[in-house]
Image (spheres, rainbow, N blue to C red):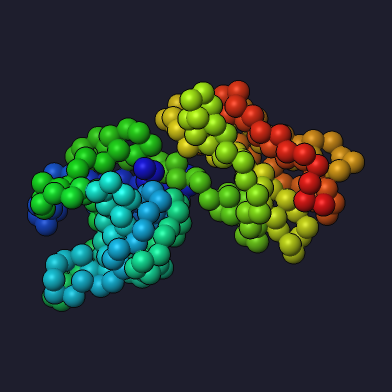
Amino acid sequence: MQAPFPCGQSWRGDSDNSSAHAGTHEIDFNRGASATADLGDTIVAAARGRVVTAAHQGSANGYGNLVKIDHGNGWYTYYAHLRSISVRAGTTVKQGQKIGELGNTSKPGNAISPHLHFELRNDGSYPGSVEPVRFDGTQFAYPEQSITSRNCNDPEQLCGPGFRAIDWAYLRGSAGVHQGTVYLAWNASTSNNCVVTVKHRNRSASSATSAYLEPAGSKRSTDSGSFTSYAGPVTRSSPGCIRWGGAISGVTYNSPSEHC
């Protein structure tokens, strides 16, 4: 699970500053210097899953516009008080996909300042079902902590406007452990390709990660180093055939000449 915010953003979370919190592991997030500075900020899925709720809760509770995502095996995330909702119940969302915008919606007569109310729950009874949250494998330092989002899975987001992922390769290490994915994206309006290598494990620690792109007849462009989340984006004008690939901790993918 990653933070419910776009890649690289820093947010402050608090679990004990609201009388509405029935459990000790519910977190309210803000990042702006004023009460309304965060209003309308993008909220993204903390992990892949199926949307089971995407609606205003009326008088049933104080969540207002709520998105609830089922991640399987009895685990759910809650995103409450949203100003707007960008997904529909019954659809599948990927990690890092926009699901709504931060707001201050609640039940009638309940005036609150804008913030994201976030929960991780299991199948038990509330409030005991609210579990401690772990972002990027590390438990949130209750009751308060500032975090930087490593929710950097979306190649379209990393490559920029106009890019669409057209190919990818999984980097699997020993015993089939999924270390990450190398993505190839294409921008039809500029005839540019983009390659990013995204880590899916151990993002709290830097490790050798690389991404490269080699248009036919040209020198290879590479981004490599010791990174926590991803390598790239590597962007090149490439109207003809290309070679592309990347690596994480010695696990490598090298494409043939393709996408001509």
Question: Height in image: 106 above or below 163?
Answer: below
Question: Height in image: 231 above or below 259?
Answer: above
**Nearest the eye: 168 or 159:** 168
Residue furthest toward the front? Answer: 175
Q: How many marks?
A: 0
Q: Position of residue 39 (x, y in %)?
A: 35, 64
Q: Quadrant of the N terminus?
A: top left
Q: Is residue 180 left or right of residue 50?
A: right
Question: Height in image: 114 above or below 197?
Answer: below
Residue furthest toward the right? Answer: 217
Q: Is residue 142 left or right of residue 33?
A: left
Residue 98, picture quadrant: bottom left
Q: Is residue 170 left or right of residue 30?
A: right
At x 48% / y 25%, what residue is drawn?
Answer: 175
At x 28% / y 71%, what residue is drawn?
Answer: 55
Residue 24: tell me if it is visible: yes
Q: Position of residue 213 (x, y in %)?
A: 74, 40
**Nearest the eye: 33 or 240:** 240
Residue 207: tell me if it is visible: no
Q: Position of residue 31 (x, y in %)?
A: 35, 51
At x 78% / y 57%, what residue is drawn?
Answer: 191
At x 71% / y 58%, what residue is drawn?
Answer: 187
**Nearest the eye: 151 or 28:** 151
